[in-house]
Amino acid sequence: MMNITPGIINQVNYSLKELQDIFSAMNSSIIVAITDRTGKITFVNDHFCKISKYKREELIGQDHRLLNSGFHPKSFFREMWKTIGKGDMWNGEVCNRAKDGSLYWVKTTIIPFLDDNNKPYQYIAIRVDITAQKDIKKITHIAYHDELTGLPNRRKLEQRLENEFHQSRRTGEKFALFFIDVNRFKNINDGLGHIIGDMFLVEMANRIRNVDYTSNSFYRHNSDEFVMILNDVSRIEEMAKEIIGVFDDSFIVDAYEFYASISIGISVFPDHANTIEDLLKNADIAMYAAKSTRGNQYRLYRHNMDEANDKWLLLETKLHQALKKDILELHYQPKIDLKTDRVVGMEALLRWYDPELGQMPPDRFIPFAEECGLINDIGVWVLHKACAQVCAWNKTFHSNLSVAVNISPIHISTPGFVEMVRDVIAGTKINPHLLEIEITEMSMLDYTEDLIDTIEQLRALGITIALDDFGTGYSSLNYLKKFPVDVLKIDRAFVRDILPEKTGIAMISAMISLAHALNLQVVAEGVEEEAELNVLREHGCDFVQGYYFSKPLSVQDFTTTILNQSLTNKSSS
């Protein structure tokens, strides 16, 4: 047994005091936290509270995302968790955000505590404040500027709006907020890849930044959304037109050349809002009003736009429901072979009737579906439905009818489009040679190389590719040389001009001759009169469709028409 003497007791008391002094020194200089295995904080020391400016009760039960500064990419933390999750110690430098928004840097060591199975059951994080060793000016710039474009970011915008808000209250001076959104940015991102999408945003930001006045008032708000603040409200229209004007020229990004457009919504403080939140919200509403008109447009907020925005949300909800509940419907317009005067196929045309909204025309809800992200789902539905239906008809009537389906430029630019078409062919068992995919001439003006590759893969499957609405774009002849299409569809506007316009017949004749010279078949759309039909037949048009033969028909009506062969009789009379 050990003999405890007064000397030993004094030595122990001295050691305890020394440990207390060491612990006190550590508590004032080292930042300590303990978490459970899920990362929830179970203990913090005083210095942790002091540097983070959070009370202990605000931290316990939270995880360290509370302190996330946004400086580090998600991959940084994934690697950290991967290391400590394996039971290994992790060391690194981390930029955190305190409760008041200020940034601080800590040199961090995280030590896992392992159970009997060598699995971490808690972690202790020991940190040292190294903020003074860092370039605070650089950190602040990073915190308040977008890494991709170099523009002031959303956090900086919030500061600026706070300042403008208080100054406007104090002086009575107005200011305007421009909410700028890239139309169909998803098409660029999905079609060409995120790297090209990022490069485009940088080029776009540089163009707008070079517009007079915008250099210090232009902010990246989120992804493809930007905000500009204008103090001189008398220049609202002038500035909107100048910004839109920078999109007149094409964008050349890497090996791609394409056009892009924007929509701008504008709200004025205090005319349109009493708070910063409402100012942003109303500019956003005005932006969607501009977007609904398509192309490069701007709109100044009006109070009745709230109602329009409600309708926009209602339309999105109902379109989701229509797709989910299979309420959408396909009508079919027959295609006539002018050599045999017989129905050889049809075009599938989407229809949507809603009890509350009524009959919704495609030119209204298709652009909307493209904007709200539903167009791909709708495209898959249409393709599958049309292929299944034509297979059923061919089986019933022992026929070889083909079907043409319109595909959105956004959808055909989506990665995996060809695989999706393969799945539809396999699922419906349609002969690929009886499927025709129509793309618009305008879709060819974007994403040349990717679109060519997609078309070539589709044609390799046996699918026919038709160029729809030919003549409505502005680079028709140039793109006809580049794109591997099989069919040219003459837009109905040219068919209408056959009779009243002196040059109408010459124009149609030239289009048909050009197509045949390129080994393309020709379909004329919108034939409504016998005289138009005769001109098309005389100049060698291969196929026609239009109200002269039949309007688009429901499945039941089309079936009856095929059985009665009424179209064949009419076309041969």
Image (spheres, rainbow, N blue to C red):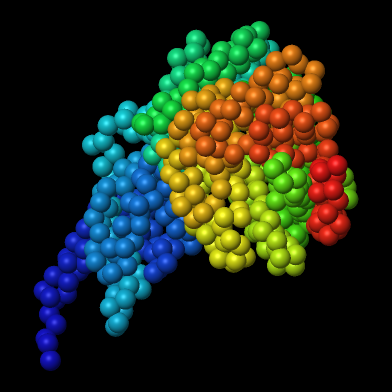
Residue at horizontal 72%, vertical 46%?
340
Horizontal arrangement in the rendering, residue 541 relative to residue 7 (left or right):
right
Residue 270 visible within the image: no
Instruction: Examine the image and state in which quarter residue 494 appears.
Output: top right
| Quadrant in the picture for the N terminus | bottom left
| Quadrant in the picture for the C terminus | top right
In x, y percent, where is residue 428? Answer: 62, 65
Residue at horizontal 70%, vertical 61%?
399
- When the figure is inspected, residue 241 is found, relative to residue 307, above or below; the finding is above
Residue at horizontal 35%, vertical 52%?
75
Toward the top, the furthest residue is 234
In x, y percent, where is residue 237? Answer: 65, 12
Residue at horizontal 52%, vertical 59%?
422
In x, y percent, where is residue 85? Answer: 32, 67
- When the figure is inspected, residue 243 is found, relative to residue 369, above or below; the finding is above
Residue 479 visible within the image: yes
Task: Give whichever of 490, 370 is nearer the camera.
Answer: 490
What is the total number of numbered labels drawn onto the structure image? 0
Task: Give whichever of 115, 84 is nearer the camera.
Answer: 84
Horizontal arrangement in the rendering, residue 281 relative to residue 39 (left or right):
right
In x, y percent, where is residue 34? Answer: 36, 63
